[in-house]
Image (tube, helix red, strand yellow):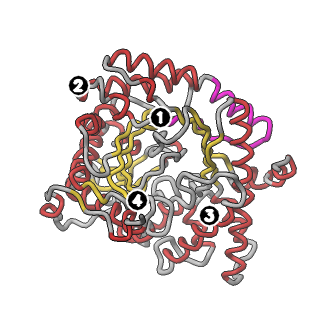
Amino acid sequence: MINLFEVNETNNMIEKDNLDVRTITLGLSLLDCADSDIDKVCDKIYDKITHKAEHLVETGEEISREFGIPIVNKRISVTPISLIGGGAARNTDDFVKIAKTLDKAAGTVGVNFLGGYSALVNQGMTHADELLIRSIPDALSQTELVCSSVNLGSTRDGINMDAVRLMGEIILDTARNTADRDCLGCAKLVVFTNAPDNNPFMAGAFHGVTQPDAVINVGVSGPGVVKYALSKVRGADFETLCETIKKTAFKVTRVGQLVAKEASRMLDVPFGIVDLSLAPTPAIGDSVADILCEMGLEYAGAPGTTAALAMLNDQVKKGGVMASSYVGGLSGAFIPVSEDQGMIDAVEAGALTVEKLEAMTCVCSVGLDMIAIPGDTKATTISGIIADEMAIGMINQKTTAVRVIPVIGKGVGDKVEFGGLLGYAPIMPVNQFSCDAFINRTGRIPAPVHSFKN
């Protein structure tokens, strides 16, 4: 049983090492909001969200006060909107209307973000899927709180290369539409392969169709806690290193389990999962890259980085999975650039490149995340980056993602400032050699042979 002793044990972690519950995310099914009339769809969506999430923010704040645990974000994820709007939307403007409704509802209940402006197109796109995808640049430029994701493939289905090609164009259009805000729209847009349907983290959260009507998912985070624990065993052998990470991950996850169960009780909504990802912030001392340096690397990106990250990710999972009844989502270690001061330092020192980050994604929780690239990067080049990352996920039977920001009007050597948890980022160079002929082929890459499990 979880008790207050365990909470008290985390006091120093909270006060000194940036331990927090990164998000309480309320997942909501909107399947019962589908209709043939777009206005009725929007009315149903607004009414359901504002009713079901009415007390989400105040509940998070009450739990935070009671247990002294910072709960940074309160969020909502919804059923992929291409499924909800497909029967009513006749054009991209109809989907943008739904996006604005989602934004209004999120603002009414006071959450930080709402995810689920999404489409799942592993093997192909329906007409509704394509309309939603083509509406993304307008939807993200005309809303503040809405996040969008598109799942482009899976180990069982292969990779939809038509959608990969289209998403390169959509990302670039989204950047252009929000150029006056340093292309912020792209920070709210991510593409996946093997996307989990219970992920509480943005921008990739959506409420899967296999989920109940409503569910509470919690994401915890404590890179600073892990770094501090490792600093006390500096120079020790790998067994000691692994045991230290596991024990620390266990304690961090127990905090998330406590918050999740309490939120579930207070909101009378089923508890879903705890996502035990190490999610960094721009705050000094809250960095995954700093953990890698504490292990003995001069910078993230130095030789040995992938091995160190693989060990970190595995030990976090081993420790965390024993601390909660249900672990899910992404669960492991995030390596965003703009949201991690240590990663930014590594890029500025020349230790970290897009190619090295791609190698690191083979062993971490997600993928190429919050990477700012030159604004004149071609759409096909962005699609090529996406295709490479999707292939890693497909072959390795893991979730991978791409969230890149082509910053219009800026190039290598410049910086872009997003603010808040999104931080800032140096513009990173990308390979300029052409992949046009490859990306412009049609169809999909077949599933790998090891996908046949039956």
The Cα–Cα distance between marks 3 and 1, rounded to whole angstroms, is 26 Å
Instruction: Answer with the quarter of the image where residue 452 lies.
Output: bottom left
The Cα–Cα distance between marks 2 and 4, rounded to whole angstroms, is 34 Å
Residue 18, placed above or below residue 311: above
> Residue 254: percent from the left, percent from the top?
74, 53
Q: Which residue is mark 2?
A: 90
* Magenta segment boundaries in residue numbering: 55-77
Q: Which structural element holds mark 4? A: strand
Q: Which residue is mark 3?
A: 317
The Cα–Cα distance between marks 4 and 1, rounded to whole angstroms, is 24 Å
| Tag 2: amino acid | Arg
Q: Which residue is mark 1?
A: 78
Comes first in the chain, label 3 or label 4: 3
Residue 56, placed above or below residue 158: above
> Residue 435: percent from the left, percent from the top?
18, 64
| Tag 4: amino acid | Leu
Q: Nearer the viewer, residue 200 or 107?
A: 200
Neighbours of disc 2 within 10 Å: few (<14), some (14-19), many (20+): some
Instruction: Answer with the quarter of the image where residue 183 lies.
Output: top left
Q: Which residue is mark 4?
A: 368
